[in-house]
Image (cartoon, rainbow, N blue to C red):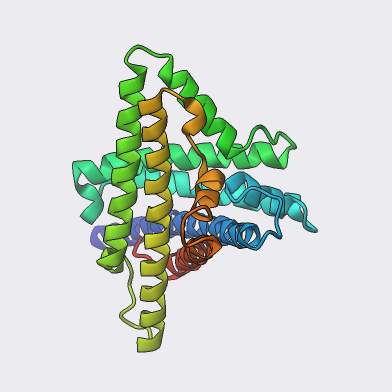
């Protein structure tokens, strides 16, 4: 009798535990969807810029402004804010709980940093939805760089930050090219064609994302070397700089398509990511 009662309680506890796991997974998947929407829109805005057909900024603020101008745009903005909040929660839980590949100290610290980042993105998106648009990404980058340069050893700090951004960008691109992301996806039950498509999205999107990050880091490093905060660039100005290379606007188009691929890969992650 007692044994039966214990088994029933264990079953209920197991069911509750499963529900908690499903809730956490759903939060992470919602976050990937929100990330995908923003990256696709940034890519679209960058393509418009490449062909001289767009006046908006090709960054997160520009993407949110694009959403806000559509029917039901404010409702979509709030949905994105919720998605980014869910991503922050999921990353935070991964940092605290630390299971599997996320159990290493480095992985837990990175997940903690990502949780803070997505919490700030959630806050910024919610503020945008309420009408507090603030300054663009480029202006924020210059302001942060100016403030940092005024600190003791500010030039060295900004230079180190630029080097970190370059390293992170190169690392993202290299890991994408090596297809490291496949370790975190469960594609075992998908058709071969689907696996090839998801792999292509991850490689192309990750390389483009890494290029943008590394380029932004270079501009921060130049700002430190020249002690000139005006040299720092946000995502929009970094993307526009690709059009000023010998490849002309076509390099910007290629990078823009890559960012759209990364957005599509985020949707794939929402579906097949191991949570």
User: How far from the left and from the top, in percent, is residue 49?
Assistant: 64, 57
Q: Is residue 236 above or below residue 269?
A: above
Q: Is residue 51 above or below residue 62?
A: below
Please state if 198 lies on the left or on the right of 259 as rendered.
Answer: left
The reply to whether residue 96 is visible in this rendering is: no
User: How far from the left and from the top, in percent, is residue 164?
Assistant: 30, 38
Say which residue appears at 57% left-offset and 62% top-offset: 40
Say which residue appears at 68% left-offset and 40% top-offset: 128
User: How far from the left and from the top, in percent, is residue 268?
Assistant: 45, 70
The reply to whether residue 19 is visible in this rendering is: yes
**Please, which residue is most extreme toward the top here?**
152
Please state if 108 lies on the left or on the right of 209 as rendered.
Answer: left
Q: Is residue 147 above or below residue 57?
A: above
Say which residue appears at 25% left-offset and 66% top-offset: 178
Q: Nearer the viewer, residue 11 or 188?
A: 188
Q: Nearer the viewer, residue 248 or 16?
A: 248
Please state if 250 lies on the left or on the right of 49 as rendered.
Answer: left
The image quadrant where one finds the C terminus is bottom left
The image quadrant where one finds the N terminus is bottom left
Residue 124 occupies which quadrant of the picture?
top right
């Amino acid at each position: 009798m007692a044994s039966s009662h214990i088994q029933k309680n264990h079953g209920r506890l197991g069911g509750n535990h499963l529900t908690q796991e499903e809730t956490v997974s759903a939060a992470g998947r919602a976050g990937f969807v929100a990330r995908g929407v923003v990256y696709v829109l940034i890519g679209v805005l960058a393509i418009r810029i490449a062909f001289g057909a767009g006046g908006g900024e090709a960054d997160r603020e520009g993407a949110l402004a694009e959403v806000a101008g559509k029917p039901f745009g404010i409702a979509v903005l709030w949905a994105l804010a919720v998605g980014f909040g869910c991503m922050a929660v999921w990353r935070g839980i991964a940092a605290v709980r630390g299971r599997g590949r996320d159990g290493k100290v480095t992985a837990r610290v990175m997940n903690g940093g990502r949780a803070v980042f997505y919490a700030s993105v959630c806050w910024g998106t919610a503020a945008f939805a309420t009408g507090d648009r603030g300054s663009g990404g480029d202006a924020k980058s210059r302001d942060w760089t100016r403030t940092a340069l005024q600190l003791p050893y500010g030039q060295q700090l900004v230079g180190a930050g630029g080097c970190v951004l370059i390293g992170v960008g190169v690392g993202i691109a290299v890991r994408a090219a090596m297809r490291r992301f496949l370790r975190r996806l469960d594609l075992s039950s998908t058709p071969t064609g689907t696996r090839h498509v998801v792999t292509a999205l991850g490689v192309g999107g990750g390389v483009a994302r890494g290029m943008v990050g590394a380029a932004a880091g270079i501009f921060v490093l130049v700002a430190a070397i020249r002690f000139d905060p005006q040299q720092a660039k946000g995502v929009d100005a970094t993307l526009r700089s690709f059009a000023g290379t010998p490849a002309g606007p076509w390099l910007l188009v290629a990078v823009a398509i890559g960012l759209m691929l990364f957005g599509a890969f985020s949707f794939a992650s929402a579906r097949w990511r191991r949570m």
